[in-house]
Image (spheres, rainbow, N blue to C red):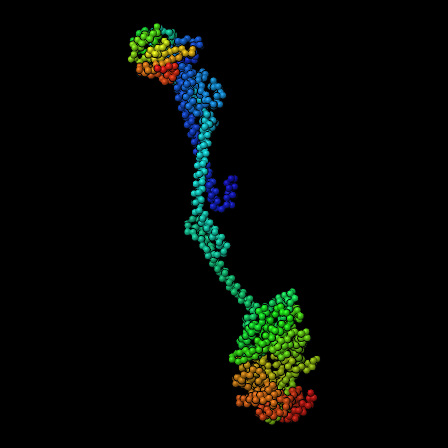
Amino acid sequence: MLGLVSQIPALSLANNINEYTIKAAFIYNFARFTEWPDESKELRVCIYGKDPFGASIDKLNGKQSNGRIIKVIRTRSIEEVKSCHIAFLNIIPPERRLYARALRDIEGANVLTISDAEGVVGFGVMIGLKIDNDKVAFDVNHTVAKASEIEISAKLLRLAKVVN
Amino acid sequence: MAIKYLRHRLSRLSIQNKLLIINLTVTTTALLFAVIMTVYSEYSNNRSSVLESLLVRAKMVGSNSTAALVFDDAEGARDILQAFSESKDVQVAVIYDNNNRALARYIKQQSNAASGSHDTLESLDNVIDIEKPNEDIDFMLAKHINIIHNIEFDNETIGKLFIKADVSHLYDEIIQYLFFTSSMALVGLGLASILLLKLRQSITWPLQKLTSLMDSVTENNDYSIRAENDSSDEIGILSRGFNKMLKHIQINDEKLAHELAERYKAEEHLDKLAYYDVVTDLPNRHFFHQKLVQVIEQAINKKSIMALVFLDLDNFKIVNDTLGHNTGDLLLKQASSRLSSVVRQSDHICRIGGDEFAIIIENIKQIDDAAVVTTKCIESLSKPFVFDGKNFFIGVSIGISICPDDAITANDLLVNADMAMYEAKLNGKNNYQYYDRKMNVAHSKKYQLESDLRHAIEQDQLELHYQPQVDAQSGMLSGVEALMRWDHPEKGMIEPDVFIPVAEESGLILKLGEWLLNTACTHAKQIDSSALKGIRVAVNISAKQMLEKSFIDIVLTALKRSGASPSLLEFELTESILMDDGEILHSNVNQLKQLGISVVIDDFGAGFSSMGYLKSFPINMLKIDKSFISGLPDSSEDAAITQAVIAMSHSLNIKVIAEGVEHKSQVDLLRNYTCDYIQGYYYAKPMPFDDLFKLESCSKISSKQLHMIKGGGGK
């Protein structure tokens, strides 16, 4: 179990492993390389919109990251997203204006926004997941993250394909 | 072993070099140790810092690669590992995940280390676990360092970082460092040596000074040198000890030198005494013999001719006996200096006896050359010698013997020269004679005569004849003169002129004189007891007798034994005897006077006539020498002298007797001159004792009677 989430033995889609299982592990790992300004004991991972993960994301529940205990929350309320540490945004259809609106709504809150919709990093989402060479990869909009007082580790930034 | 070997080698070196070697050895050892320690420490430090830096980099890269590990991002991991490309030493770096699967690897280009695949960690040996660093010596000296670093994230080990670093550059560095420190050490050693050379002089310089001082002392034997060193170290003590020792040696040396000088002086003096005559400063008999042997040898070897000239002063004995030994010595000195001045420098003149000299003449061309030298000698001594303002004449008799003609040994040559000299004496003195073989016969005759004379005294071969003396005025027998006759059993009658000189020369004269005195005294007693009673008996006394201390005792004994009356005795002395100014002579003459024995001067006028003794001695009578009488009556000079002597004697109350009177005319003249007594053939020849009593009329004999007796003797 631990191996599955903390280590990603074969994050290649070719290995016939579910894409979102890998993405869930990515989310966990993002949490580990990120620091938030609050002191809460809870690290709230919210799934906003349609849940693509299924049970694989629930495996994060109760896991520790930097002394915080992860709690997976599925929500449709943008207001609730504001109280999350990580928000996986899965807005359908993945249009720019919809993402812009959601992002505007949570502006000011210290939320690491993640999405796997195409080009979302350009819309203002902090981390955008994508498939590259049959492997899950990610881009980072560091500017937005910094504006939200979220510190993404340089180690993580180094792995990003594109950093804005 | 090494130290023993070193000590052995060192013991052969000078102190200078010992000091140098010891100091350099110590310095080198210290420097070597320092260099090794420094180099090791440097290496150790360098290696530690290299290791430290590797570990730091491993941690950093490990930490940086956490995200890549977590995301299984090989590309990201490779990017991170690419950081090692800046590092010179890291050859290989591999990130492993928890399943020991290599996520990413970095291999330095141009590196041989790429040979290994490093796919899994199992293939690796000799790796450093960063938690437990290996510090053993193999690790310390290894050219490569392998490090495994556990990559942790969130208190979990999520993978490992393997690094293989090439640290061979450490060796290059350390070799450079070794070169540098060694160079510095060598420079230090050089500086130390220079310093040492300067400093060791303070030790070796005084030692060198001391040794060179010692050398100069032993070389020059100069013990007055002193070491100058006042330092209080061991060398100072050595110097002072050395000086003290030198002082002792110097004192002893000076003492020794002084002692040696004294000894040399003494030896030189002894040598001179041994080879030189102290009176004349001429070489002595000892030298003469050595020289003679040497010259003869040379003459024989070179086939040349050499001459030995033997000289004997004629009248030296008279001067010595009459003027004393001091004057005699003076005469010898003057005579020797005259002789020395006439001989050539190459001739050797020596004094070989009392008045005997010898000249060795080398390399003469012909035998006659020797005569040239001897003639000069005779001439040089013919001039008078002056003592006390008086002239003394001495002559010299010389014999010459030639080598190899006459003899070829020193002894034979000397005997021959002596014989030739004796021949010269017999020939009337003051001449020279070459040796002739006939002389040998004469010589042996002389010695035979001496031997026979000795026997003659013992065996009573001698007898006394008496020649009558007549009162000039009355013609009466007044006395007789005792004269010795020697009737040799084989050779017949031998004249006193022949045997008296032999007796004088051999010393037999004393014995002869004593015999004469005793016999004459016995005869005097017999005469006094006969018809001839009252006539005096004259006895000749020799110089040697008169100068004997015991002479008076002998006279007294003779008188006592014979019972003769001293007043009937007359002792005839020659003038020369009275020339001696000695105490013994004075005492003897005075005692004779006291005994009542008359003293007559024999042969007056023949020798050195010094009238002084006529006053100082109690003289009773003078006997005028026959040489004056023989000239009478024709020689006016002899007549004048005879007359003057008689007149002078009478004025001094001294009687006069004339001897050698042979003619009537002489008797008449002497009577005319008032001569007191006459002796001579005119009256009587000497006759045997018994014949005296055949004379008629005991005390009154006429000339006729005497002639009768003469005729009766038949001789």
* Nearest to the observer: residue B246 or residue B44: B44
- Which residue occupies the foreground of this view, B4 or B139? B139
Locate residue B433 relative to residue B258 in the image: left or right: right
The residue at 47%/18% (across/down) is B119
Position above or below: B188 against B486: above
- Compared to B632, does B143 lie above or below? above
Would residue A86 be visible to someone looking at this image? no
Q: Residue at x 54, y 65 (%)?
A: B267
Residue B536 left/right relative to B93: right
Q: Is residue A100 above or below residue B121?
A: above
Which quadrant would the C terminus of chain B be assigned to in this image? bottom right
Residue B633, horizontal then vertical, whole percent:
60, 90
The image quadrant that residue B475 belongs to is bottom right
In the image, taking residue A76 as reference, residue B6 lies left or right, namely right
Front in this rendered view, residue B597 or B368: B368
Quadrant for residue B362, please give it: bottom right
Q: Find residue A45 and report its horizontal and vertical position in percent.
A: 34, 11
Which quadrant would residue B318 be assigned to in this image? bottom right
- Percent across and percent down for residue B94 are 44, 19
